[in-house]
Image: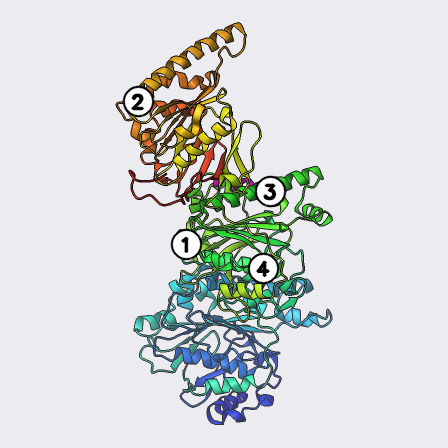
Amino acid sequence: MTGAAEAELSRQQAVVGVDQLDPERCWAARPPERMLRVPIGFDGSGTPVTLDLNPSHHGGNGPHALLVGAAGSGKTELVRSLVLGLAVHHHPAQLELLLVDHLGGSFRGLERLPQVLGVVGQYPPHPARFDIDPSLFARLGRFLHWLADERLGWMGALGARSMEEYNQARKAAQQQPMRPMVIAVDHYDVLVSQSLEVRDALLRLAEQGEALGMHLLVSGERLDPGALGGLERSLSCRIVLGTPSPAESRMLLGTEDAYGLPPGAGLLTGPVGGTVLFQAPDQSGLVQPVADRVASWAPPRPRALWPPPLRPMPLAEVVGWLSIDPERGLSTDQWQPGRMSVPLGRLDHHVSGPDGELPRLELDLARGGGHLAVCGRRGSGTSTALLTLLTTLAVTHTPREAGFYCLDFDGGELAELDGLPHTATVSGPEDTGLVRRVLGDLTRIARARTELCRANGVNSPTGFRQLLEAGEQGPLPREIFLVIDNAPRLLHEHPGAEAALLELATRGSLVGVHLVFTTDRWAALPPQLVELVPTRLELRIDEPQSSLVEPRLAEQVPLDVPGRGVLLDPRPDGAAGVPRHFQLAAPVLPRTSTPAETCALIRQFGTGVSVPRLEPMPTMVRPEQLPPAPGSAFPIGVDESLAPVSLDPFGTAHMLIYGEPGSGRTNLLRLLMLGIAENCDPGAARIVLTDHRGGLADLPTKLGNHLAGFAPNPESLQPIVEDLCTAMSARLAAADTAAAEGTGQGWAGPEIFLIVDDYDHLSGPTHDPLLPLLPLLPEGGRIGLHVVLARSTAGAAKAHSGPILTAVRAAGATGVLLSGDPQEGPLFGPVAPSPLPPGRAVLVGPDGNSTLVQTACNTDAVWQPPLAEEDALR
């Protein structure tokens, strides 16, 4: 294991100046049998001791070697010297090096060596940290398998069984040469304890490496057979430095000779030459200067196969060069108009791209309906993911091509992009009306577009886009994105939202309406909704075993890196995707540092075209602002689309109005009665009013002949109810007789509207003055009896099951929910009270359909919050 050339080079490294190292001598051509030989020290007589990684049948001790040394034995210095020695003694055309140290310190400074394919590790290194990015291990395992598969593919194409046979045949076939490769792995014992994937890949290389020309140089502090995991069968060559105990020396060498060795001293043993004691020179101060000298002899490799690690990055890095286009505003020429694929970050891969970088993470919004779900625990970056998506869409699409309707039920971060020309609205939980309007408008748009496609025989998204281009698109953007941050909260606070989202997810895939939402847990969403959204970005989640992508990879997502996650990377042929790690970019562009600045930059260079703003419902509507309604109907307010809402009193059986003090329930009663008086003849409609708290005390004089009875207190209500029961019972008997004889209605007279305000203060568990009417309520439609009850939402859930309220509902009552406490729960179907501005109400018809209405304010006073129940002007 000695030689004159090696001796000369060893002494040259140790004695002469670094600047006197000569590439012509060091990199001179050498025969195959002298390849893969590197001096590691000197024996007792001063003769160089050389490590030879050639297999034993070529006179060496390879193809693989094991280096073991306890802390302080000089192991790291020696492994660095061995790598550097290989680089000094082999031209880049003769050798490739792959350096692996997941702790990130052993090979620092050697990455510029021209033989190095890559340095695998945590960079920048954190010697005091052991929370290594787990995705590194998965990528390393795939990379090592890929290196072996690549060489097997080259050999298979030429029918070769080894690197030597391939190199003999490749010139005639004009194929690239195959160079020997040395894979140096430091801290192997720690590495394989954390990754079975890497251990299995290294075991494969140990078994196939000789034929493939791939050699392992494995080092660690404690490499007993258990830690080696079967690799010891292939490591016939061993370098053992000082061991902490005689037992470990016996385990590695069969003797106790390595116990107590001084730093840098060691034993080299292998199938050829027996065991040699050597002393490695102290070259700690020479390694970096020599590495820099060797790096200057040749340019770096044109492409480093090992890609850089996933890391946070600005969106500017992946979106491409930005320019100002007079027709498109701030845009990038890398994404042509009409393209539905958008860049969002970097996708992890075990081989770098042509530019030496990781491939871009591009989401194809033409795939899977263009719907997207982002799942992640708090702090994982779910809101930022939405900001990045919207920013990218704003740069790659004009407001005519893409528009955003945002519902922010999380931390309010989406408000930073409210000024984008692409944004129609950003609304939150405090504006229930706008939330309902967004859901209602987009549902109507999706339905109208579906009918347009059906009428024109279009059944694909591409056909729909062509249909819009051929006709008049209108003011709406071609692609509409409903963006929901924290979808579970939206569904909890708006029970009717689930049906809307399911419809949009089903219809929208054809007609350019895209659903994008975040959640902290997949289980917090309806399973049917999750199934309709196949494109999923999964950031760090609390329970990786519940991952819908790949539980094993989800476990590897770091806890403290926002934007890091896993997804199924779809294949171009449409086959099942491959689970991969990704890193989302931060939503910042050149000259910006926050999403708000990014929004301002896009707006500054915009073309002046914007998506029509979706303004919130007004909080004040006057009756005189509303157009008249046909027939006996009269307007009571406007809906979410600002269209007038009318009420036909004769088409309404009964009505229940719930609202907290100050919500506008008494004002609504005033609207109803004045509407009846102004639109109906007294012979067609009469009103019986009970107002024991005085909120409607001025109405009797205004109603005139329409007022059939007025009860200003509970005592005066009883005889009115008795008279009403007598009259309505007579009507019922006449109606029954007429029905039996088939002679028509059977009775004559006006429709009677019994209107009761503050019903909760009038009735109780032991007494209800309306109970005599109970058997007549189901027949109200036949006998012209309409009961309108208004009460507070406080305690409504309990009172809702009372006999009068139950009978009124069963008879087909229209429900009106003004502002109230959501804790009361659903009162009409799935609709529960919620905090609303004064006069805002959810109108629920007998069929269960609901409409959000801003009722007209029929008073000169401005809405005021209540002071107390007794003094509130409702």
User: Residue beneath label 1, please?
Assistant: 377
Residue 161 position by quadrant:
bottom right
> How far, Cα to Cα, is label 1 from label 4?
27 Å
- Asked if residue 335 is among those painted magenta in the image, a careful observer would answer no
* C-alpha gap between disc 3 and disc 1: 31 Å
Query: Looking at numbered disc 1 in the image, what kind of residue is underneath it?
Result: Arg
How far separated are the C-alphas under marks 4 and 2?
67 Å
Provide residue 14's location: percent of width, then percent of height. Answer: 46, 90
At horizontal 62% and vertical 78% (from top left) the residue drawn is 93
- The percent position of residue 801, horizontal first and vertical second, equals 34, 27
Residue denoted by label 4: 394
The circle drawn on residue 753 is none
Q: Position of residue 711 (x, y in %)?
A: 34, 24
- Image point (45%, 55%), residue name: 554
**Disc 4 packing (10 Å; few <14; some 14–19; many ≥20):** many
Instruction: Determine the CA span between mark 2 and mark 1.
Output: 61 Å
Query: Which tag is nearer the camera, tag 2 or tag 3?
Result: 2
Q: Quadrant of residue 687?
A: top left
The magenta stretch is 497-510
Residue type indicated by callout 4? Ala
> Is residue 505 in the magenta section?
yes
Are the residues tagged 2 and 3 within 8 Å (C-beta)? no
In the image, residue 232 above or below residue 276:
above
Q: Nearer the viewer, mark 1 or mark 4?
A: 4
Residue 108, above or below 335? below
Helix, strand or loop at disc 2?
helix
The image shows a total of numbered marks equal to 4
Cα gap from disc 3 to disc 4, whole angstroms: 22 Å
Q: Is residue 563 above or below residue 699?
A: below
